[in-house]
Amino acid sequence: MSGNQNQADYWSSESGLKWIWFEKELDLVFNAVDEALIRKSLPQTGESVLDIGCGTGATTRTFSKYISPGGQSRAVDISPPMIDQAKAHVHEHSVKPTYHLADVQSDPIPGAPFDLVISRFGAMFFADSTAAFANVREHMKSDGRMVLAAWAKAQGNPWFEAPKDGAVNRMGPMDHSDPNAPGPLGFQNIEHVVGVLRQSGFVDVSGETTDVILAHPGPLERVAALASNIGPAARILKKYNGTKADVEAIKNYVFERFRGFETEGGVRIPARLNFFFARNE
Ligand SMILES: C[S@@+](CC[C@H](N)C(=O)[O-])C[C@H]1O[C@@H](n2cnc3c(N)ncnc32)[C@H](O)[C@@H]1O
């Protein structure tokens, strides 16, 4: 047992399924994260790429464009509904992604060895991150590279902080846990993650914080609804059996906090991310 059944359950529950219900809007908002991943990992035509914790596969599909023609695009996720939704997408590039239901920590991953492993917010949830990255590394070519995108700390990340504050004000505190515990903020501490990746056998490991702008055409109300339904708000709503009225209250709070991010060209929210780089020797 890998200890990740709780993640399979969470990401198949109502809270996780919101990533499917809000898929189009989330992919718009997180497009800036994909762009940063592309800039930092430089996928090449013909390469073999693996997306870990792929969700509904937007990042997988974006990378397929860069490795076409001739490359190979694989993606894995532990949540059956996420994988089903990913498979339902039409592929647009000559490299057609293949999606697999798998626990990154312990399962064999088809299509190895890979030149490049990437993840957008899908690598912070493993019960045993050292074991998970050792498993990933075993599926990589020698000299293969890995680039991961994760959230930096909540402070200074309004996308995270505003819905969390709104939910805490309305319902009560989050569980206090180890800041490095599996979860959306589990990779906020660069030194910790660099240590884990080295322990997993990777070399040339580093991490850096990068600021991006999360953009959405608006209106602001839609963005507030989106932020209030996923992330920390979703977790607090789940903990306290939140109602529709609670979601509405959080949304109104987030709306006020996000007012300053409204521009003529849509809603633009500054965000702070941690990127991690590692190489298989
Ligand atoms: C925050 S979502 C990100 C999804 C996608 N990368 C995106 O940006 O839209 C995290 C994803 O990691 C997946 N995940 C969590 N633990 C996993 C594990 N042990 N193995 C594979 N996938 C996992 C979840 O099922 C979920 O789809």
Image (tube, rainbow, N blue to C red):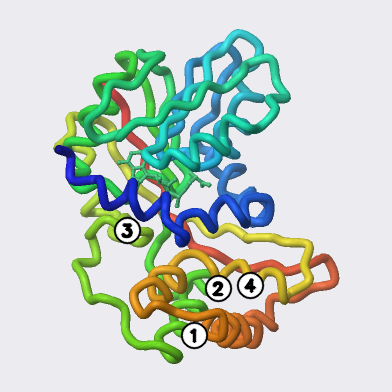
How packed mark 4 is, by other alpha carbons closer than 10 Å (few <14, some 14-19, many 20 or more), is some
CB under 8 Å between discs 1 and 2: yes
Q: Amino acid at mark 4?
A: Ala
Q: Which residue is mark 3?
A: 183
CA distance for labels 4 and 3:
21 Å
CB under 8 Å between discs 4 and 3: no
Q: Earlier in the sequence, mark 4 or mark 3?
A: 3
Asked if the residue at label 2 sits under 8 Å from ligand 1, the reply is no
Image: 103 above or below 196: above
Whether residue 55 is visible:
yes
The disc placed on residue 225 is: 4
Q: Nearer the viewer, mark 4 or mark 3?
A: 4
CB under 8 Å between discs 2 and 4: yes
Q: Earlier in the sequence, mark 2 or mark 3?
A: 3
| Residue, far right | 264
Image: 141 above or below 275: above
Q: Which residue is mark 2?
A: 228
Could you say whether the residue bearing mark 1 is in a helix, strand or loop? helix
Q: Amino acid at mark 3?
A: Gly
Image: 280 above or below 56: above
Could you say whether the residue bearing mark 2 is in a helix, strand or loop? helix
Could you say whether the residue bearing mark 3 is in a helix, strand or loop? loop
Left or right: where does residue 26 sit relative to residue 272? Answer: right
Q: Name which residue lies at 30% across and 14% down.
A: 142
* Quadrant field for ligand 1: top left
> Percent x, y for residue 33?
56, 49
CA distance for labels 1 and 2:
8 Å
| Residue, far top | 70
Q: Which residue is mark 1?
A: 166
Q: Amino acid at mark 2?
A: Ser
CA distance for labels 1 and 4:
12 Å
Q: Using the image as rendered, state which of residue 153 and residue 104 is in the foreground.
A: 104
